[in-house]
Amino acid sequence: MSADGATELTWRPLERGDVAAWRLLLEIIEAVEREDEHPSEQDLLERFDDPYVDTARGSMAVWDGDRMVGYHWMKARTAADPQHDFWQVGGVDPEYRGRGIGARLLGWAEQAALPLHEERFPGAPLALMDGCVVGSASEALFRQLGYEQVRWYHNMVVADLATAVAELPASPVPDGVVFLPFTAERSADALRVRNDAFRDHYGSVPQSSEGWAHFVGGTAFRPDGSFIAYERGQEGGAGAPGQPLAIVLAEEYDGHRQATGRRDLYVALVGTARAGRKRGIASALLAHALRRAAADGFDTSTLGVDMDSPTGAVGLYERLGYRPEQSYVAQQKFLRR
């Protein structure tokens, strides 16, 4: 092993055939970090099909023989507004930490991101985005490499869904509104709500139709646990009664269930279009989804939320039984201003 502890290892992009070793590495990291992340091999394979991930040029795996000991991949945003934030995800086997692998992966990312960025948004400002648990050792590494802490998030959990649902306050469907299950015919309506709802959220850009299709077509997506609120009494397309107003979209990860023995409803998106705000629609729709999930045998529910959400989302979730479990901080480093 050389002085920096990283140069005698094998470095190459992630490939589909690596998913078994990749999943093993993630479970080793999870045993130490305890972030309740348990992706399946199928979940990892789907990342190769994401239209905003270029694994051939925007990913890296670190190997000690046939053992993966580190990884990194990047995901482009759909717009450069006000800059192009290139999101990155990575990790290092705890046994191999302190050898410079994490720093070298982040250094590689700075070089790899530039040509990928130029192909999408030539000349636009570029920043790398990452994140870590507040108080973790990774905070020091990001600080050392010139990252700035820019936003904080909660991972929130309903640890006993059946009990929480039994204690939910009354949440009738608001007047003039109807709740309908997500269907393929209503997918475009859900995308419309998503893009309108998140226009004023930090770091959010419009989702493209290609990215949306990848999301709702994933094996984790649960259409039967996802719902759309519509205005009642108006004519609308795709069999809907009127204008779409709000969404609650859910996922369930098989790897999590296999690892923990519990079914978790991960609420991937909650959003209300401007036309539906301040009417109690989102809280009633999420309560509806939680009641349905409890009836379907889910044990817990989790979601992530911006601590400074402009719509007061943290308070809404707390009223429905969610409690903060971990806090994360988003890290940003500009490569081109």
Image (cartoon, rainbow, N blue to C red):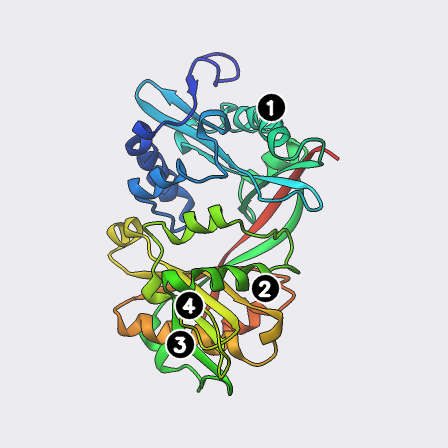
What's the CA distance linking mark 1 and mark 2? 34 Å
Mark 2 or mark 4, earlier in chain: 2
Q: How crowded is mark 4: few (under 14 residues within 10 Å), some or many (20 or more)?
A: few
Nearer the observer, disc 1 or disc 2? 2
Q: Identify which residue is drawn at 30% across, 21% down.
A: 66
Mark 3 or mark 1, earlier in chain: 1
Q: Mark 1 points at which residue?
A: 111
Residue 16 versus residue 12: which sits nearer the camera?
16
| Residue 58 placement (x, y as % from top left) | 50, 29
Residue 305 versus residue 328: which sits nearer the camera?
305
Q: Which amino acid does label 4 sit on?
A: Ala
Q: Mark 3 points at which residue?
A: 288
Q: What element carries label 2?
A: helix
Q: Which amino acid does label 1 sit on?
A: Gln
Pointer 3 with pointer 1, Cβ within 8 A:
no
Q: Mark 2 points at which residue?
A: 197
What's the CA distance linking mark 2 and mark 3? 19 Å
For residue 184, side relative to residue 141 (left or right): left
- Residue 238's mark? 4
Q: How many numbered badges does the structure rendering display?
A: 4
| Residue 200 placement (x, y as % from top left) | 66, 60
Pointer 2 with pointer 4, Cβ within 8 A:
no
Q: Which amino acid does label 2 sit on?
A: Ala
